Image (cartoon, rainbow, N blue to C red):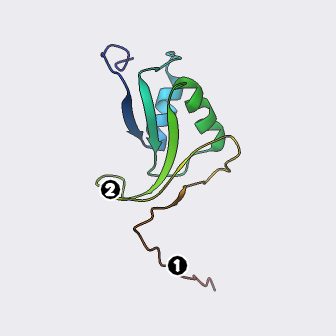
Amino acid sequence: RSLQKRDIQNGAIHLSPSQVRFILKEKVENYEPITMVSVGGGLIEKSELIKLQAKFPKADVDTTYGLTEDGPRVTTGKFHANCETGYIGVLLHFLLLPLRRWVVQ
């Protein structure tokens, strides 16, 4: 509701999955001034992201992985209905991501 009280044009917002769940419970249905939404900081269900897109009809919704508080992002990507739960985008072009194999015994 506080977003609707402000005069925002072409706004961007970063949300954690907990914040997304809070927004989805709000009665407000349309946050049109927001044109970019980034979600990161934990696992979020595909169904929640689809509902989030409906709340922000003019926004691109990106999923990200990286340091939540300070950045930089490690991966980012536009969410769309064909993405699976857990989609975190692709590695940013200037980063290397070493992978380790974990063996559980």
Q: Residue furthest front?
A: 93
Depth check: give the residue in front, 9 or 65: 9
Q: Residue 4, image x and y in percent?
A: 38, 15
Q: Amino acid at mark 2?
A: Gly
- Residue 35 figure quarter: top left
Residue at disc 2, secondary structure: loop
Residue 55 is situated, as x and y percent measured from the top left of the image, at 54, 24
Residue at 50 percent of width and 44 percent of height: 62
The residue shown at (34%, 19%) is 2
- Image location (x, y in percent) of residue 100: 53, 81
Nearer-the-camera pick, 22 or 68: 68
Q: Tell me which corner region of the image, top left, top right, bottom left or bottom right, holds residue 81.
A: top right
Residue tagged by mark 2? 71
Q: Quick one: SS at disc 1?
A: loop
Q: Relative to residue 23, is residue 95 depicted above or below?
A: below
Residue for badge 1: 99
Say the numbered circle drawn on residue 9. Answer: none
Which quadrant is home to the N terminus?
Answer: top left
Label 1: how many Cα within 10 Å (few below 14, some 14–19, many 20+): few
- Where residue 18 appears, as percent x and y from the top left, is 46, 40
Q: Is residue 39 left or right of residue 3?
A: right
* Residue farthest right in this picture: 82
Q: Residues within 10 Å of mark 2 (few under 14, many from 20)?
A: few
Residue drawn at 38 percent across, 34 percent down: 12
